[in-house]
Image (tube, rainbow, N blue to C red):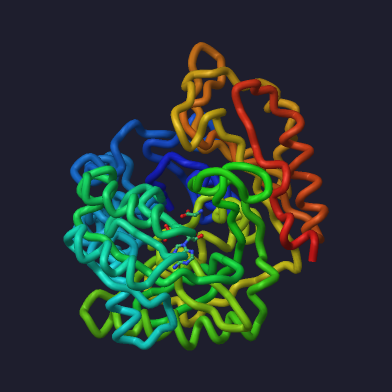
């Protein structure tokens, strides 16, 4: 079958790698792709949010199945347009993608289905928002309602920071996303990422992971898209997974179906776990990046079968064939990220990395020019390894990092510290 993956990050490189392990894949195109993806698949230079261009590409290349990686094309309705055109597609409709695109929508789904989440209030004006913060006190969490590329959340440990965040958001610091603000109770505990597939009727858990959001070692510095991850997450015990499914995921999916917006694709629940109780921080309607890199290395070829069954509404007949293994990914980012950073710096040393079924250098933001590999993004490489233990996965991932010759890059040296120190 001919498959198209939309996106250009480390997540999409990992998806492409997993899809290629499966003999069902005859031809793979990734649009737009990146400097790593182009070494394993054909890349097409189109904008993944441009519905017309995506449909044209599907027609030209006789595409049978489309996998949508990032949230932006989903929120733009690309999955709807593809399905309307009769093309099998993995990814939620625009209506179901509201679970990520609008924080207040997710809160309403939680309310309607009684799912445990942080108490919250929604504001459209600065004055009442500030009164609420003064009445509640800190710590408190201020969120722009809408897609803000992971930057619309301020976890304020003191009242002044929270009040300043209100001024920023209503002052337009986050563009249109700040016109509505959600203020939330601060949740204490251990964070985990939980991934399930849903075909609109059935739900199948496919893995757990822990991300590292802060830029620097010791969980210091600004929030990023994620500097490294590992899977599975020890905090997600069988009992907590069951509770999460029964109290959060299944009721939310049932509520979406009831509203006429059944969710089809991968649902990524960001959870906070304390004293054996999971609470929902947020939903995303796509794989996490870099969590996906760990999940794909662990799932391998079956990832395509699972995504196909999701798109075809056959999830009830599927099971995940788990190996008793661990994976870790270490992100290398351009110095300065998540703030301003230099683009176009040269990366060397990757040819020394043996890419195997347990060690992969996924590219997140690279391009090739005149025979050179250049960094184009904030997050640039995701060195991902698998092992019988987390320690083994970690040692392999950091051995790959050692091979990379890129003076303008940096990485955290403590990915997995929480699980490895237990
Ligand atoms: P989000 O973009 O919603 O994932 O938020 C980014 C990060 O902010 C999360 O991964 C959490 O670390 C933190 N966060 C979000 N909401 C809360 C909350 N209610 N309590 C504590 N931390 C939070
Ligand atoms: N790694 C977190 C995310 O993809 O949102």
Picture residue at 70% right of the left edge, 28% below the top: 404
Taking 214 as reference, is 390 above or below it?
Answer: below
Quarter assignment of residue 345: top right
Picture residue at 39% right of the left edge, 54% below the top: 160
Image position, residue 409 (x, y; %): 61, 28
Question: Is 398 on the left or on the right of 274, as rendered?
Answer: right
Q: Of 221 and 315, which appears nearest the observer?
A: 221
Image position, residue 29 (x, y; %): 42, 41
Question: Is 87 on the left or on the right of 160, as rendered?
Answer: left
Q: Of 258 and 421, which appears nearest the observer?
A: 421
Residue 257 seen in the current view = yes
Taking 414 as reference, is 348 above or below it?
Answer: above
Taking 31 as reference, is 263 above or below it?
Answer: below
Picture residue at 67% right of the left edge, 78% below the top: 237
Q: Where's the C terminus, which quadrant?
A: bottom right
Image position, residue 217 (x, y; %): 67, 44
């Amino acid at each position: 079958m001919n498959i198209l993956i939309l996106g250009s990050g480390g997540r999409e490189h990992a998806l492409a790698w997993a899809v290629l392990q499966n003999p069902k894949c005859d031809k793979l195109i990734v649009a737009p792709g990146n400097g790593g993806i182009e070494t394993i698949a054909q890349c097409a230079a189109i904008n993944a949010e441009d519905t017309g261009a995506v449909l044209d590409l599907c027609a030209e290349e006789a595409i049978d199945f489309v996998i949508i990686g990032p949230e932006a094309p989903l929120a733009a309705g690309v999955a709807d347009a593809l399905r309307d055109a009769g093309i099998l597609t993995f990814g939620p409709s625009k209506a179901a993608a509201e679970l990520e695109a609008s924080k207040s929508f997710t809160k309403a789904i939680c309310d309607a289905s009684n799912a445990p989440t942080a108490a919250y209030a929604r504001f459209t004006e600065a004055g009442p928002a500030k009164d609420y913060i003064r009445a509640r006190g800190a710590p408190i969490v201020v969120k722009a309602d809408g897609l803000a590329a992971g930057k619309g959340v301020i976890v304020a440990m003191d009242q002044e920071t929270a009040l300043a965040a209100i001024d920023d958001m209503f002052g337009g610091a986050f563009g249109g996303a700040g016109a509505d603000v959600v203020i939330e109770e601060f949740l204490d505990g251990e964070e985990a990422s939980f991934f399930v597939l849903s075909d609109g009727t059935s739900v199948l858990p496919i893995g757990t992971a822990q991300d590292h959001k802060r830029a620097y070692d010791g969980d210091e510095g600004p929030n990023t898209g994620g500097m490294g991850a590992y899977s599975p997450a020890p905090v997600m015990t069988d009992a907590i997974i069951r509770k999460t499914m029964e109290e959060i995921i299944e009721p939310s999916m049932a509520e979406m179906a009831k509203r006429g917006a059944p969710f089809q694709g991968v649902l990524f629940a960001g959870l906070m776990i304390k004293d054996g109780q999971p609470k929902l921080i947020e939903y995303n309607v796509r794989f996490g990046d870099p969590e996906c890199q760990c999940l794909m290395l662990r799932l391998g070829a079956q990832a395509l079968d699972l995504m196909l069954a999701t798109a075809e509404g056959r999830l009830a007949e599927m099971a995940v064939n788990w190996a008793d293994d661990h994976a870790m990914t270490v992100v290398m980012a351009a110095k300065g990220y998540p703030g301003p950073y230099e683009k176009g710096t040269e990366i060397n040393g990757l040819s020394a990395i043996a890419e195997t079924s347990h060690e992969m250098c996924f590219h997140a933001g690279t391009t090739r020019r005149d025979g050179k590999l250049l960094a184009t993004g904030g997050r640039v490489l995701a060195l991902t390894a698998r092992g019988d233990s987390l320690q083994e996965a970690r040692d392999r991932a950091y051995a790959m990092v050692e091979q990379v010759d890129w003076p303008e890059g940096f990485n955290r040296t403590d990915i997995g510290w929480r699980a490895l120190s237990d």
